[in-house]
Amino acid sequence: PARAMGDFRLIPISKDSLEWQCSVLKLGGLTILLDCGWSEALDPKLLSPLLPFLGELDLVLLSHADLKHLGALPYLLTKYRVSCPVVSTEPVCRLGELSCVACLEDREKYQAPVEHFTVDDVLRVFMSRITTLSYRETFQVQVRGRTLAVCPFPAGHHLGSAYWTLHCAGLSALYLVECEMRRSRFLDGLEYQRLLPAFRGQAQPWDVVITTPLPATAALPRRGAQQAPQELAVLTKAMGVARSVREQLLLEGTIATVRRGGTVLIPADVAGSVPEVLLLLDAAWEQDRQLSTTYPLVWLSSLGDMILDQIKTRLEWMSQEVLKSFEERISSHPFVLKNVRIFQSLEELCSAHPLTRPKVIITTSPHLEGGDSRELFMRLCGEPRNLLWLFGVPTTGSLARQLMNDFIFKHATRKEYRLQQYFKQPLPDEQLRAYYETKILELHESGQTLPPELMQYKTEIEDLVRVKLEGDVPPDASPSPPPDEPELATGTAALGAGSLAAPRRAGALASKVGAGAQLWTPVGWPSSRTVAHTDVRSEGDEYGHLLTALEMRTWKAQDQGSDKYGVAATEGADEAEAAGPGLAKEEAQAAKQEDEATQALGDWRESLRVHFPEPMRAEVRERTVRVGCRVRFLPDSAMEPKDMCLLFRAI
């Protein structure tokens, strides 16, 4: 109707909704933000068209738990003042939180931390700002005398994914993006009955239907992906678990690659494609013992265990088939994966399974923009036996999009790229020491109480704060320590072994700092001593055992004398026997104190690292990468063109 069109306006924020979803809907005088997605680049410039509308928002709707649909939400709610409600289903909230955290942590393994928001901001936003709903639960917002009612229904794409119905001022709108008509391995399909006018008890169709367009690129393979596989193609037990042509293609390419001695890299979204791929590959590996015993199936993610736990505990959001199977046999939970091993870092993976051996690796950066996905690709791409899978349509300008353009559209077999490789290096000792001292002073100035792991070092921290606040003492003013206080050698840290074994008073500590000594040096850090520094070193015999000075003289007399077992040796032995017990006791006591001090100092440094994450220096290097591996594209599990046309005709 004309009135409906006058009260309706849709403003797209993302230039391509296939890459990331974000749009503003004006319906019946109210403003609704439909999804708040972002790309892996986390570029704030992409959100510039949205900023003028933030003050007008009356509601934010979230449909899916991946970065594509809610990645920018923590940034916007942290950086700008947005006071309207944010609603989603409960799994979208929990898995969306893990998706954002996984994106940040995976990126910060190799790159500098994001300046716009932190992991703490993500946790705060998802814990306090989002209202969670169940399927078919209505949420109402009353603003300026108008009432907006929204309700989520199963969309079938990912766990907790929903399409939304909106009613305001006599107008009805349907927000239907990224849905799946058919049943998947653990989810029911789209609940399309709710979309039909007859089911809603209304004769007229929806006033507005908002959906995702189909890919306009004709060269992009898509049709027939959801059809049942041909029985003739099922040659092995592993291939028999495929339920669609899409799954059949994935298994064929993956199994053939590992059996030829290659490695398969599957970058996928944490809350999107990863659960479905894990279930498929685990089922295939379970059917073929040769696959499970010969070719490792690994998932590289710092939050893999946590994500699986969140999925396991939400059986009520899964399909009726899964629920019935679990009720009949509790041990039949679909996400009890028997053949998948999770690694939190690339170093752990390489130590357990060298990259030269065939395996299947699932990573969590689908567009290869950073993290372990990009690093693994650069290490594996030169080998022709390896295979890279691309899921969905990558964002413009990403590495995955370049590979799709060259290897999928143009059918290239080899290509050179000039890419940026990211590294992280430890800070120099002096900078790291200054960083920890600054953090301790900031903690003191903020008036916060010390964390539990630092309470045992309260005396040392108070000395450090006192010295820093009082300032340096002139170099000529270096009074000698009192008799009851042992003197600190030049280069020894005030919070080092000596200070932990016997805490110093702040006055003597300030004097040493003013005289040019280092304030404190955690264990393992080299001091400022040069090669010419004269330090008393313990000597040992030819077996490497440390000897006292008396034992060393006795041993040398025995070894160098004309009569090894003559008078000189006997006298030395008598002298050692007479003075040995006292010396040995004193040296044992000193060694014990030194070990305790070193252990305490090690605990001090580790405690600092727990409370204040150790900073790293990020570096970027230009590198020429020759890509010779095979690159294949797999269509996503969304609706096919035929299904979409039939659905829209019905509603």
Image (cartoon, rainbow, N blue to C red):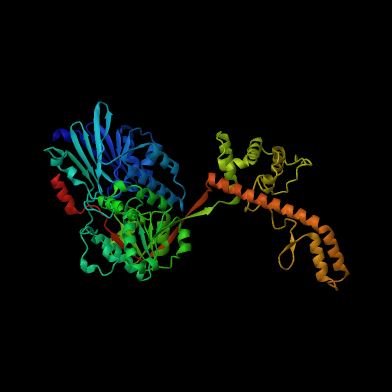
Instruction: Give the residue furthest to the bottom.
Output: 562
> Which one is nearer the viewer's eye here, 31 or 444?
444
Q: Position of residue 26 (x, y in %)?
A: 24, 35
Could you tell me how many numbered marks the image carries? 0
Instruction: Note whether residue 570 is visible.
Output: yes
Q: Position of residue 426 (x, y in %)?
A: 54, 53
When asked about the image quadrant of residue 388, the answer is bottom left
> Which one is nearer the viewer's eye here, 218 or 238?
238
Instruction: Give the residue furthest to the left.
Output: 203
On the rendered image, what quadrant is the C terminus found in?
Answer: top left
> Which one is nearer the viewer's eye here, 332 or 213?
332
The relative height of residue 468 versus residue 256 in the rendered view (above or below) is above
On the rendered image, what quadrant is the N terminus found in?
Answer: top left
Q: Position of residue 143 (x, y in %)?
A: 28, 28
Instruction: Note whether residue 430 is visible.
Output: no
Q: Position of residue 164 (x, y in %)?
A: 24, 41
Instruction: Give the residue furthest to the front.
Output: 328
Whether residue 41 sits left or right of residue 612 in the image: it is left
Query: Residue at image x 18%, y 53%?
Result: 641
When asked about the image quadrant of residue 2, the answer is top left
Instruction: Give the residue furthest to the right.
Output: 567
> Which one is nearer the viewer's eye here, 219 or 285?
285
The relative height of residue 527 versus residue 485 in the rendered view (above or below) is below
